């Protein structure tokens, strides 16, 4: 049994959530606004819910409602997080009703989806909430039955007192329990007693999804809502000079055309306030099609905006960042990256004496890896509903981090945060893009200007050409060997536009005596943002491909070679701050070797590649099996192993890993955004190639390392290493190394 | 504008729109049937798939004037209670991640099984390759189509 003190001040939000519980009785009418499902009707539901912690409500009829605190974008939190509450509350999962929680950080914690943090961040608080509520119900029953609380047992939402033969439902005691003080300390279940968590449960929104119920931001509307779209510059580095909207305004349904500033001059941007285009040319009309059509009639003159400055909030006060105005092209990006790669860079980590080791080496290999900008391409394009009045605002949309956007809205709208009602919808994908708030600010200021409820919608073309891409990256790796082909030094120097990707303290740091990591950055007006496993998604691709070559030089099996390095890192680690646990890293490799039949003669028919990576506190390894199909290499099978500690919902977790594998293969082979004179060259799926059904592997076997470690991230960790596993398998298939993403560009040329 | 009469999910409805409006926006903006999704507007992603006389069609480039008198089926009309074999198979396999593309996937699959009740893997792959799933649920989609075919 684990004990947990609920008065732990380090986790203030949990404390608040528990304190918010006592005595609160809320009728459903107060919650109805949070539901996007038109089917829910207050009349169908019981009149009174008794709240037991901010996460749980119970009716007298023993209907148990659990609120999911965190935004859902496909990572299954809407199901997985309430499962954690249900486990400790000890209720029958089949009888639980799950609802998306309101945006309320006091009751429901940080409410941020990103960094594979949802389960990791909420694991303890949700267990505590479930256990606290159970404790309160037991106390209520003990008082009513006049028996010691310790003698009461629970099972599936029922209470039992063996000696007196009394029993009852949670619902019978919910009213009384809701008035009981919060327990100072709660006992948590032993992991081995779990019967909800670690047992696959179906997606709680599955029925709504397959029947097309309104779930997503784009589905939300209200009577009288106007549609707004933004005509943004055709190129990064441009802005509106002038416009003629006469023809547009003559089109049916069009209400207004105007310009607005996203942020006023001197606005200090927070980290996720990224602005790509500050001068917004807005078309507002009655329906989506009318606005789409009328936009085409705009006559706009664009002009270079020149160098600009962003005022960024920072830990040490605000700082100014210069955004260069020049129109950029992919060809010049490559030239500039070469130039920067040759210059001295920022030292990120140094162990031993790498310079001397390289000078004295019997053999040195050097390889350079490149990866392009990537668009997130969430299937649901960016959108937001806003209804801003003088004294309040309603904002409904798909976002990963309401709590980050709300302070920005508060400043821009000059409204106190408590006057802004932000509602969280299911997201049609996010992948990092939806942590950024500009769409929400745009919708809000447009609504304020037109004094009406507004639905801001990006077309696919808008979505794909609006920036906040995965950065363009490059890295040069060098390895030095002695006369006996021992690895004696390792050097990585990486950079990007506009961000340095290198994680200096990750493997193989800690496993090589002489180690050097350096980084550099090239400023750009092409905006970037988090993209599924930021930086890791490139580092793993490059580093794990390079290690494959290093193993080859040494004449070693790529898995055995990595295991040897990890053994060194475990037994006699080099340097400090090594981020990974060598044992857990080694275990995913050992297991993927076993599960993939790495050494089996029967698998010789495949061109096989392996890669592993640690990020977001979890470990992942893949073996990719490539075959030739119509003369082209094709990823036919993948074996995946992940260690993310306790797996909450195994079938959904398997789905997530399979999805990460498909996503990774797609981006490795096809993903790319390119530029010419500032213009993004791909603006829809006609030119931006996405992996299709027929291009996905036939089989993806997923295995989880079984342990009782508290759960860590899953959405991101399996994604980065798949790029390198594909590259290493392609090498076996095509007898050449693949250094430049997207890889398919090379074998397609050949075909 | 003269009203256009449509047959949507077995019901006759009348809409007052520009005849050049794509069916997608008539469904979403005028009839409030939002299960049919916008994904690309150029018939490349399949999120907007409906059935027109039992054949899968991308509704984002289909002019409303071209479909009068033809039977339009959207995800809302695929079954009365969400119990079409394809929908049931999607639930059984727990296919969805974000879920946004899945109504389009389901409509494509349902149309495939109407014309070909026992498709081969290659036929499933060919039919389903017009529908992008950004979350990468293709393996489960294939399994779900096969499961639904068995139930037929």
Image (cartoon, grey):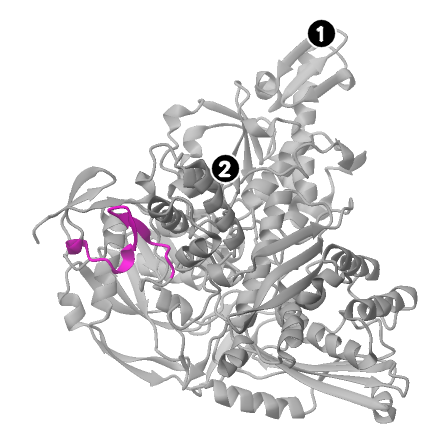
Please give the label number shown on residue A153. none
Question: Mark 2 Cα within 10 Å, few/some/many (few <14, many 20+)?
Answer: many
Residue A713's spot in the image, x, y percent? 66, 54
Q: Judge by depth and name the residue closer to the eye, A144 or A728.
A: A728
Residue A627 lies left or right of residue A439; in this view the side is right
| SS for dot 2 | strand
Residue drawn at 67 percent across, 70 percent down: A540
Residue A337 lies left or right of residue A102; in this view the side is right
Q: Judge by depth and name the residue closer to the eye, B111 or A288.
A: B111
Q: Is residue A747 magenta?
A: no
Residue A660's spot in the image, x, y percent? 58, 58
**Quadrant of the frame with the N terminus of chain A:** top right
Question: Mark 1 Cα within 10 Å, few/some/many (few <14, many 20+)?
Answer: few
Q: Which residue is mark 2?
A: A99
Residue B100 lies left or right of residue A735; in this view the side is left
Residue A745's spot in the image, x, y percent? 51, 79
A476 versus A278 height, above or below:
below
Q: Quadrant of residue B128?
A: bottom left
Q: Quadrant of residue B84?
A: top left
On the question of residue A672 being in view, the answer is yes
**Residue interval drawn in magenta:** B45-66
| SS for dot 1 | loop
Q: Chain of mark 1?
A: A
Q: Judge by depth and name the residue closer to the eye, A348 or A733.
A: A733
Q: Which residue is mark 1?
A: A165
Residue drawn at 15 percent across, 72 percent down: A246
């Amino acid at each position: 049994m684990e004990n947990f003190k609920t008065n732990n001040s380090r986790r203030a939000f949990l404390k608040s959530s528990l304190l918010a519980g006592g005595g609160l009785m809320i009728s459903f009418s107060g919650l109805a606004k949070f539901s996007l499902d038109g089917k829910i009707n207050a009349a169908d539901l019981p009149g009174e819910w008794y709240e037991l912690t901010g996460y749980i409500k119970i009716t007298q009829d023993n209907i148990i409602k659990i609120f999911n605190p965190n935004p859902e974008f496909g990572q299954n939190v809407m199901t997985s997080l309430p499962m954690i509450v249900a486990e400790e509350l000890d209720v029958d999962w089949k009888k639980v009703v799950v609802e998306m929680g309101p945006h309320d950080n006091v009751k429901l914690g940080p409410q941020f989806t990103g960094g594979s943090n949802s389960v990791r961040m909420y694991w303890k608080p949700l267990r505590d909430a479930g256990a606290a509520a159970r404790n309160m119900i037991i106390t209520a029953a003990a008082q009513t039955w006049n028996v010691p609380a310790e003698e009461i047992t629970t099972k599936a939402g029922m209470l039992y007192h063996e000696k007196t033969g009394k029993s009852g439902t949670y619902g019978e005691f919910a009213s009384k329990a809701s008035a009981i003080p919060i327990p100072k300390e709660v006992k948590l279940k032993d992991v081995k007693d779990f019967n909800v968590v670690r047992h696959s449960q179906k997606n709680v929104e599955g029925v709504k999804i397959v029947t097309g119920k309104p779930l997503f931001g784009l589905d939300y509307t209200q009577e009288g809502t106007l549609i707004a779209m933004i005509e943004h510059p055709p190129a990064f580095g441009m802005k509106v000079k002038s416009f003629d909207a006469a023809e547009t305004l003559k089109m049916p349904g069009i209400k207004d055309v105007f310009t607005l500033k996203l942020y006023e001059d001197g606005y200090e941007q927070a980290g996720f306030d990224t602005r790509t285009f500050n001068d917004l040319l807005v078309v507002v009309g009655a329906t989506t099609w009318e606005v789409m059509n009328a936009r085409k009639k705009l006559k706009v003159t664009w002009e270079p905006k020149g160098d600009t400055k962003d005022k960024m909030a920072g830990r040490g006060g605000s700082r100014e960042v210069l955004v260069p105005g020049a129109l950029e092209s992919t060809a010049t990006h490559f030239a500039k990256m070469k130039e920067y790669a040759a210059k001295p860079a920022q030292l990120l980590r140094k162990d031993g004496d790498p310079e001397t080791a390289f000078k004295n080496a019997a053999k040195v290999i050097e390889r350079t890896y490149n990866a392009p900008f990537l668009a997130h391409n969430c299937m649901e394009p960016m959108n937001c509903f806003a209804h801003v009045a003088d004294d309040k605002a309603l904002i409904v949309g798909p976002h990963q981090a309401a709590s980050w956007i709300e302070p920005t809205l508060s400043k821009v709208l000059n409204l106190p945060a408590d006057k802004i009602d932000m509602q969280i919808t299911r997201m049609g994908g996010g992948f990092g893009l939806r942590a950024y708030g500009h769409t929400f600010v745009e919708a809000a200021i447009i609504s304020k200007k037109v004094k009406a409820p507004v639905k801001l919608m990006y077309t696919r073309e808008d979505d794909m050409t609006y920036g906040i891409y995965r950065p363009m990256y490059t890295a040069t790796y060098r390895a030095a060997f002695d006369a006996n082909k021992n690895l004696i030094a390792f050097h990585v120097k990486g950079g990007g536009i506009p961000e340095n990707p290198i994680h200096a303290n990750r493997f193989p740091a800690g496993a090589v005596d002489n180690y050097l990591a350096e980084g550099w950055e090239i400023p750009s007006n092409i905006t970037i943002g988090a993209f599924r496993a930021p930086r890791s998604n490139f580092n793993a691709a490059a580093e794990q491909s390079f290690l494959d070559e290093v193993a080859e030089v040494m004449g070693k099996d790529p898995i055995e070679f990595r295991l040897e390095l990890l053994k060194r890192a475990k037994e006699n680690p080099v340097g400090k701050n090594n981020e990974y646990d060598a044992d857990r890293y080694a275990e995913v490799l050992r297991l993927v070797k076993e599960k993939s039949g790495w050494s089996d003669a029967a698998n010789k028919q495949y061109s096989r590649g392996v890669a592993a990576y640690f990020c977001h506190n979890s470990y992942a390894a893949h073996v990719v099996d490539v075959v030739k199909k119509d003369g082209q290499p094709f990823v036919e099978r993948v074996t995946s192993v992940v260690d993310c500690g306790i797996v909450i919902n195994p079938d959904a977790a398997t789905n997530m890993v399979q999805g990460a594998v498909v996503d990774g293969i797609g981006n490795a082979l096809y993903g790319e955004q390119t530029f010419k004179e500032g213009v993004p060259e791909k603006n829809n799926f006609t030119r931006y190639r996405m992996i299709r059904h027929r291009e996905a592997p036939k089989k993806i076997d997923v295995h989880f390392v079984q342990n009782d470690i508290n759960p860590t991230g899953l959405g991101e960790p399996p994604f980065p290493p798949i790029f390198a596993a594909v590259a290493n398998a392609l090498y076996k298939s095509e007898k050449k190394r693949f250094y430049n993403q997207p890889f398919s560009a090379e074998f397609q040329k050949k075909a | 504008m003269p009203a256009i009469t449509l047959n949507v999910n077995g019901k006759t409805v009348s809409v007052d729109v520009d005849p050049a409006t794509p069916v997608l926006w008539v469904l979403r903006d005028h009839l409030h049937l939002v299960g049919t999704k916008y994904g690309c507007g150029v018939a490349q992603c399949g999120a907007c798939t409906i059935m027109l006389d039992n054949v899968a069609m991308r509704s984002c480039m289909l002019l409303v004037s071209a479909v009068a008198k033809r039977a339009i089926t959207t995800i809302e009309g695929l079954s009365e209670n969400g119990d079409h074999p394809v929908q049931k198979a999607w639930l059984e396999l727990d296919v969805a991640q974000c879920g946004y593309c899945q109504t389009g996937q389901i409509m494509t699959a349902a149309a495939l099984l109407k014309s070909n009740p026992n498709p081969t893997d290659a036929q499933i792959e060919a039919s389903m390759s017009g529908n992008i799933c950004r979350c990468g649920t293709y393996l489960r989609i294939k399994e779900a189509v096969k499961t639904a075919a068995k139930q037929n």
